[in-house]
Amino acid sequence: MTTMNTAPSYATETPTQTRLRLLDAAEVLFAENGFRGASVRDITQQAGCNLAAVNYHFGGKVNLYREVVMRRLAALRAGRIEAVKAAMSRSGGEATVEDVVAAFGTAFLEPLIASAAGRRWMNLMTREMLDPQLPSDLIHNEMMVPMRRELVTALERVCPGLADDTAELCMHSLIGQLVHLERLQRSAERDTEGGGFAAYSFERMLTHTVAFTSAAIRALANGARQ
């Protein structure tokens, strides 16, 4: 009786495929253990590569870490920007503040809550805050600046009279609320006894955030016009 070898074989894969496997393995281990806690040996073992593969494909562990962050950041950024664009075009020029805030809020939260990749991103960013490895302005330049251009412009279009700097502050306020909702959702999932964290559904919290933020934006714009 012959036995089949079920171990994966990567002998015929392309360099691009090997690179992706390294990124996938590194993302998991960096999110679980942080930059310092994830060794090159651990990463290459999980990816099924030889020890030299990280240097060959990325030029070292630091560059691999940066590529892991940039890959996930680019996907999240694109989703958020496209959601705002879609909200504006879907309404045929008649979009409301609620349309924009709801579209951005949903695009911001859904990937972080509904997918393992989004959860890894939040773990990764928490570890990066505690033990920074990236240039201090990288997240700002690669995420906040492009996102600001789209969201602030949309808010100013749907709410005439809203000053540019006020719109930007509203954006930061909204993001702060959304990050808090993501944390509450995680806590609710761990709250097996149904205590305070599970008191409100995710949908209700997001609906409240959209209504609260939209009302605040309108009030700020109206105050500026008076």
Image (spheres, rainbow, N blue to C red):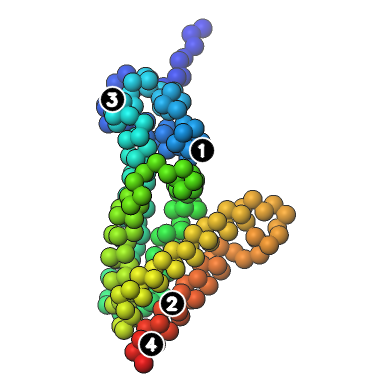
SS at badge 4 = helix
Q: Quadrant of residue 52?
A: top left
35 or 9: which is nearer to us?
35
Front: mark 2 or 3? 3
The answer to whether residue 87 of the structure is visible from this angle is no
Front: mark 2 or 1? 1
The answer to whether residue 66 of the structure is visible from this angle is yes
Q: Amino acid at mark 3?
A: Tyr
64 or 133: which is nearer to us?
133
Real-space Cα distance between discs 2 and 3? 50 Å
Real-space Cα distance between discs 3 and 1? 24 Å
Mark 3 or 4, nearer chain start:
3
Q: For the point 34% across and 46% down, which residue is it?
A: 135
Q: Which residue is mark 1?
A: 32
Instruction: Decide: is 74 above or below 86.
Output: above
Q: For the point 37% across and 19% down, which residue is it?
A: 50
Residue 131 position in % (x across, y down): 46, 43
Residue 151 position in % (x across, y down): 33, 67
Real-space Cα distance between discs 1 and 4? 47 Å
Q: Amino acid at mark 2?
A: Ser
Count of residue discs: 4
225 or 98: which is nearer to us?
225
Do residues under tags 2 and 1 come within 8 Å of each other at their CB atoms? no
Instruction: Decide: is 124 above or below 100.
Output: above
Q: Which mark is residue 56?
A: 3
Q: For the point 47% across and 53% down, which residue is it?
A: 112
Label 4 packing within 10 angstroms: few (<14), some (14-19), many (20+) = some
Q: Which mark is residue 222?
A: 4
Residue 84 position in % (x across, y down): 33, 66
Front: mark 4 or 2? 4
Q: Which mark is residue 214?
A: 2
